[in-house]
Image (cartoon, grey):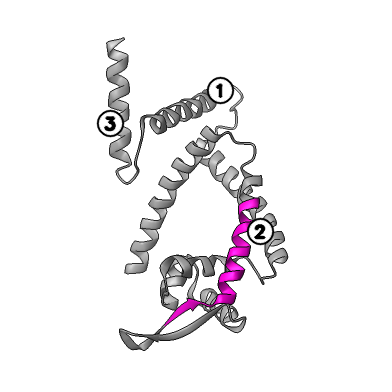
Amino acid sequence: MNNQLVEIVNLFHAYQSENPNLAISIADFCKHYLANEEIIAIEKHPDNTKNIGVEGELGRALGRMSRFSEIELKIVANYIQVDNIEEIWYLGGMFELQNPTKSDIIHYCISEFSSGIAVINRLLAKDFVEEYPDPQDKRAKRLRITPKGREKLLFAFAELDKMAKDIFLPLSADEKGILFQILSKLEQFHKDKHDKKHDK
């Protein structure tokens, strides 16, 4: 019994060390531990005859979920009357970043520069955002959301919240917590890689 307790403590310490940026509770660790044990069981299951690693299965599942989400997002974009959902991502990013430069918002939305400029130009043409001189650098310009853009963003958020609830409907509260914890770690890893490339 004491050996098992020591093993659990060591596993918890190792998990904390691997995730220094996450506030991990005992409950979070227990969810992670049980999920990890289930993954190991899946890999060892006799039906797993394709010899596909769990990474391959995860990639396949994420890819298909991405396609399902794209279909739903097109429906939402049509309902809220925007050309595509990227316009809402950019409005949301501008709201969070508080009056960014064009370069800042394009990097935040993980877009190619030309594609990002096209989205920004559409938002300017629709009077959802406006440009103004940067107080610190008169050669530069910043972007801010107009009242019309804020109204559109709030309307879109309400519809996207309905969509998110529908997508995650089959999951229990605990499963949602585990999934959020795992995806947050994955997102942070790839964000750091993306930021390093951008800084070069």
**Residue 61, image x, y percentages:** 59, 43
* Of labels 1 and 2, the one closer to you: 2
Figure quadrant of residue 33:
top left
Q: Give the secondary structure at mark 3.
A: helix
Q: Is residue 189 left or right of residue 42?
A: left
Q: Residue at x 60, y 36 (%)?
A: 171
Q: Give the secondary structure at mark 2.
A: helix
Which residue bears the numbered disc 3?
13
Which residue bears the numbered disc 1?
45
Q: Residue at x 59, y 32 (%)?
A: 50
Q: Earlier in the sequence, mark 1 or mark 3?
A: 3
> What amino acid does circle 3 point to?
His
Residues in magenta? 142-162
Q: Is residue 149 magenta?
A: yes
Figure quadrant of residue 52:
top right
* 83 w.r.t. 63: above or below: below
CA gap between label 3 and label 2 equals 40 Å
Q: What secondary structure predominates along the stretch shown in magenta?
A: helix
Mark 2: few/some/many CA within 10 Å (<14, 14-19, 20+)? some
Q: Are marks 1 and 3 in contact (CB under 8 Å)?
A: no
Rendered image: mark on residue 73: 2
Query: Residue 169 or 17: which is nearer the viewer?
Result: 169
Query: Residue 180 or 112: which is nearer the viewer?
Result: 180
Q: How many marks?
A: 3
Mark 3: few/some/many CA within 10 Å (<14, 14-19, 20+)? few
* 58 w.r.t. 37: above or below: below
